[in-house]
Image: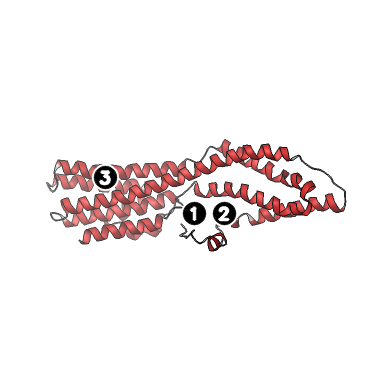
Amino acid sequence: MLQYDNKNWFSFIFRHGSKHVEGMWWSMLFMGLCTAGLIYLNEETKWLHFEISSTFHTVLGIVLGLLLVFRTNSAYDRWWEGRTQLGALVNTTRNLAIKVKTYAYAKNPDLSSETLHLIYAFAYSLKEHLRDEDYSAIIEEIPSQYLNEFQKFDHKPNFILGKIAKNLHQFFQDGIITGEQLIILEKEANTLINVLGACERIRNTPIPMAYALHLKRVLLIYALTLPFGFVGQLHWLAIPVVLIVFYTMVGIELIGEEIEDPFGLDENDLPVDELCVKIKANILEIEKY
């Protein structure tokens, strides 16, 4: 996720564009060339004279604007809910680590240390799970005694949560914690399960295909007919006008596409890697003191 300062208008506006904008350059070049060719045929050769009434784009633009607003709001809601769940992940791992350290560390430091290790290992496994990665980058974060089982398990975050639950129950069986303390610890562990499920829901449930397809079709019709609405009135000035409108409309759609899956590696996605590093540092600090 990019860090930025939007208080300085000029440096912010003219900073290097994000990938969604960079992906538009060829489309904008195509639109500019098409508009220039249409103007040439209309103005210089008089071979083609075809103009669409501005009413067409006014009406279609209103409908398209409503579709784009819904598209953007839907994508941002997914992005923000993802950030909310990651915030819950940070808070819950801290709470669980603090309680394990307070309730059990003095009586069984080995099992407590293992449990703390599993807590931040869960954050790393969740990150790779949401990105469909091969987990090779986080092998060092997994307790060595569980590594073989971890690699064989299909749903690896579930494996980590199962080991955490087993350790919490072991604390209770050994008389290290009371029944009330076990309930408190299990409540925190259940919150981690809820975070996992919510993140999977965001990751695996895109907007309905019919809606996405209809929006793209309408946007394509609007973009391809746009030059015909300006050539007769603006002549060669139609080129920058068409490009500005095209940049605005298509840019909104591309932003929605980028942020609707907030756990990836795009520059506008959520800082999952940084949060995992923070969770690990926090838990190791809790264990130390």
Q: CA distance from mark 3 to mark 2?
A: 38 Å
Where residue 176 is drawn, which disc sits there?
none
What residue type is disc 1 on? Asn
Measuring from the top left, give residue 231's x and y in whole percent: 77, 48
User: SS of the residue at dot 2?
Assistant: helix
The residue carrying mark 2 is 20
The residue carrying mark 3 is 188
What residue type is disc 2 on? His
Measuring from the top left, give residue 151's x and y in whole percent: 36, 53
Q: Residues within 10 Å of mark 1 (few under 14, many from 20)?
A: many
Labels 3 and 2: the sequence-earlier one? 2
Q: CA distance from mark 1 to mark 3?
A: 30 Å
1 and 2 marks in contact (CB < 8 Å) = yes
- Give the residue displayed 36% in from the left and 56% down from the top: 276
Q: Is residue 246 above or below residue 214?
A: below
User: SS of the residue at dot 1?
Assistant: loop
Q: Residues within 10 Å of mark 2 (few under 14, many from 20)?
A: many
User: SS of the residue at dot 3?
Assistant: helix
